[in-house]
Structures are given as structure tokens and as C-alpha cells.
Amino acid sequence: MNKLALRDEAFQARLSSFLQTKAHLCPEKLRYLKHAVFVLRDNCGQEYILKGIKQRASVQQQLDFQVAYPDPNIVRFVHFPNGELFLYEYGYYWLLMPYREGLSLQFANKQDREMAVEVLRNFHLAARGINVADPVIRSPLVYKWEKRLHRFSKTRFLFEAAGKDSLAREIIDTTASLLERLRKDIDWYTMEKTAVDRRSWTHGDVASHNFLRTNSGTVNVIDFDLLSMAPESYDWIQLGQRFLPYVNHDIKQLCSHLFLKKEEEIEFILRSVATPVDLIREWLLFSRRKRSWKQLSEYVSNLEEKWKQRVKFVKDVEIVLT
């Protein structure tokens, strides 16, 4: 089931019929929000988020986790009217949660960045020690990044078409060098084992849109599809990369935001933030879609400017850490 099909009114009609027949839920309106996520209003006027998840393991982990998680403000899945917590159809496990009005945080705003750090830190503390029957254990971050770099290298022909092969080559060579150092300097096995022993959890996708400020003023982290038992530092690395453009790639500001104090923690997180896997991820998302020649040219030019900023940050990190 592709993204276009999920947007299709005919599919939504079939989904509504399925929910009415199997879940005893009568949708009055379905509104497409993003891939496999809908806002649903039932015939009583109650609004929900209807979400489709492909992996059964992720579904079960989230359900087990939400039972044990102590914060009452987390948005939890609720039962369908037929008593089930999830139903399978059209290649997805469908789950229901209450709809909450609110706005995403904006990382361009300093107060919102500080709020994201506070909320994420509280999430880590509240989640620490939670045990689930079959936790999803993902590969160490460095392996994920190496695979991402490999996929990036296969898109080099697009840079050649845009006359920017040298940019692709520089990104590949620099990233490979940074990853090699991380692999050599970090004891990934011990770090991962410590996280499992402590039962430390990461959210996995700390984008600004996953921090919801509700109408009551509280800020909650949402969307736990990438929840994983893993080192908490993984979330801080990702958040640091997302903060970079808004702190002018300034190391002092970044460390201040993330409260980095321990020397070994500062070195690991700064070197990881400097590694341009976030820029590569954005490029891979762009390259999967059909784009015009003009769009390709504009994106590559924009990436080139971002790359210049990242190269400077990499050099600044090296100066600070030596």
C-alpha cells in the first residue's frame, strides 16, 4: 500500500467500512494527516488519531511500554469499541489514540529548544528501568550510519548530473573518515550492553514535530514508532544535529543547550553530531522522490551551502577536542 493509495478517497472509504465492520467504530470523517496516520471523528463527535504500523514487534513494544511508563501525560493507545487494541488490515496494524489539539515546538525559538531538552530528559528518566517482554534492539548507531553512507554513494550519479560530483566525493570521503574514527575510538558493545542492563530507552525521532505543546500548555513527546532500548546519548546526538542550524553551528551554544559536562560524553556527542549523517538522510529522502531538473539543481546548491557550514563545524570540533 503506497502513500498515494493511502491518500485516496476510495481507500479511506474501504478503511472506514473495515473499522465499522471489525472495530464497531463508526467514522463520520477521516482526514489524512501523514503516511498511515489519520484524524478520525466518530459518529458521536469524538476525535482520535488512527495510526497504521507495519511491524507487529513495534506495536507490541509500544503497548507494553505505555503500560509501564509512569507519566500520565503520555498519549496512550486506547481500545477500539470492540475491545481490541489493534486490528490488522491492508498491510498495517491499526491503532487508536485520543486526539490532542496543539502545536509542534519550533527549534528556531530558543525557549522551544530548551523545552525540548527538558521534555526529552524527563522522558529518559521516566523510561529508565522499564522492562518489556520483547524489546526491539536495533543495531549500534555507527552500523546504521555506515549503511546510510553506502546508500548515499549509490546516488552519486545525481550529483554528476548536477555538475557537483566533487561535492558528493567530499561528503563520502569526510563521512567515511569520521565514521572510521568513531568505530575505532568508541566501545560500542559496552555502551550498548550498559544501556540494555540499565534498561535505558531512546525515543528515536526527536524532530520538532514530535514535541507537542497542547492547548493546556504542557509539552509531550509523541510518536514512539522508533522507540528502542539503547544508549540515551543517541537521542542527544540527533537533537544536537537538529539544533545546529539554529545555534549558528556554535559548539558553546550547543553544549549549553544539551548540558554536556562529562569530558567523554562531550567528545562522543560532538564528534557524532559533526558526522553529516543527518544531511545524508535528508538527501536520501529527497532522492527517492521524482524531482525536476530545476528541483535537483536547487537542492544540490542548498546542500552545498549546508556542507560548507558542516565542514567548518567539523574543524571547530577538532580544535576544541585537541
Image (spheres, rainbow, N blue to C red):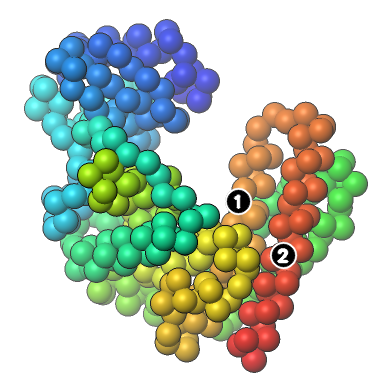
Task: Report the front residue among 310 and 7.
Answer: 310
Quarter of the image holding residue 42? top left
For disc 1, the neighbor class at 10 Å (few under 14, some 14 to 19, many from 20) is some
Q: Position of residue 58 (x, y in %)?
A: 31, 45
Using the image, tell me which numbered label, if any, was put on residue 100: none
Residue drawn 42% across and 87% down?
262
Residue drawn 86% across and 43% down?
162
Type of residue at label 2? Gln
Dot placed on the residue nearer the N-terminal end, 2 or 1: 1
Q: Position of residue 248 (x, y in %)?
A: 63, 66
Task: Report the front residue among 45 and 321.
Answer: 45
Element on which disc 2 rests = helix
Task: Say which of marks 2 and 1 sits in front.
Answer: 2
For disc 2, the neighbor class at 10 Å (few under 14, some 14 to 19, many from 20) is some
Task: Report the front residue among 128 and 300.
Answer: 300
Element on which disc 1 rests = helix
Q: Position of residue 92 (x, y in %)?
A: 35, 29
Q: Is any atom of residue 158 visible in this view? A: yes
Q: Which residue is mark 1?
A: 281
Residue drawn 20% across and 52% down?
65
**In the rendered view, does 99 fall on the left or right side of 288?**
left
Taking 198 as reference, is 79 above or below it?
above
Using the image, tell me which numbered label, if any, was put on residue 309: 2
Spatial distance from mark 2 to mark 1, Cα to Cα? 17 Å
Residue drawn 82% across and 32% down?
293
Taking 64 as reference, is 265 above or below it?
below
Type of residue at label 1? Arg
